[in-house]
Image (tube, rainbow, N blue to C red):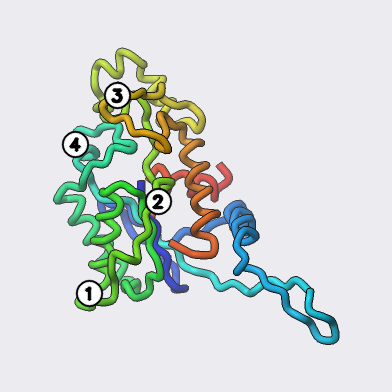
Amino acid sequence: DHFLLASTPSRPVVAPRLGAWVIATMLLNSRLAAAAEVGAARLAGCRRRLPSSGEATGVLAVQKRSVSKLILIRHGQSIWNGKNTRFTGWCDVPLTVQGRVEAVAAGQLLRARGFEATKVDVAFSSELQRAHETCELALASMAGPDQESWCSDRIRRDSRLNERHYGVVQGEFKDADHVQETYGADTIREWRRSMHAKPPPLDESHPHFLPSPAPRTESLADCQRRTLDWYVDTCVCGCVYMHPSLEQLNKYSQGK
């Protein structure tokens, strides 16, 4: 559940954790480069036909593409991931005061490292308010006194960047006795750490049920798949926040 900011090229920056997890740069390996080529082939603007010397128009030439900087920021603390954490998933809960402070601090850190808001061409967020507000606060903080240099219109929201859906346990406290007794600690650990295990799906009677196209449950692999679909469709020739979604993009880049 996150957003990714894209800026023009700049030297790499590695930011420490500030409660909100900030990764100012992400080096994508050949697996993501391959995904980028798939996405590029989908976009007519990524290729054009140019005549070479002495031959007729019709030779396929690939346009030279510049390299952009990807800035990945996890949302700040929400009311459900503080001291008593819940399986939040697609539940649209707000940030805490601390979470808002973390988002502003992340923007200040990026600005101090040379990333002003004017360098961000476009920002992406999930549909969830905790991610979108983090994105807004970070951009405003990156702008400093030049508040006219950014606006919310620059942020594009996409549900494919939403947090991993936790099915029937969505909204439950992670250490709730009845959850532990019903499913067992080993099963819950497998849901959270393995790529393909998933909680039982919720149905229309669940208090946090959402209609289609929202999923009814997801594994980490499901979350990774939709995040990569977003990356190929949107980020490759456009550019870019995305936590489970961010984590799944990172795992894919590392070949995991």
Does residue 51 appear anywhere in the picture? yes
Front one among 193 and 148? 148
Q: Which residue has dot 1 on it?
A: 147
**Rendered position, 148 above or below 177:** below
Mark 3 closeness class: few <14, some 14–19, many ≥20 residues within 10 Å: some
Whether label 1 touches label 2, CB < 8 Å: no
Of circles 4 and 2, the one toward us is: 2
Q: Which residue has dot 3 on it?
A: 206
Q: Which residue has dot 4 on it?
A: 83
**Rendered position, 65 above or below 239:** below
Mark 4 closeness class: few <14, some 14–19, many ≥20 residues within 10 Å: few
Q: Which residue has dot 2 on it?
A: 158
Q: Quadrant of residue 44?
A: bottom right
Kind of residue at badge 3: His
Residue 225 in picture, x, y percent from top left:
52, 42
Q: CA distance from mark 4 to mark 3?
A: 25 Å
Q: CA distance from mark 1 to mark 3?
A: 43 Å
- Look at the numbered disc 2 and give the secondary structure of its residue: loop
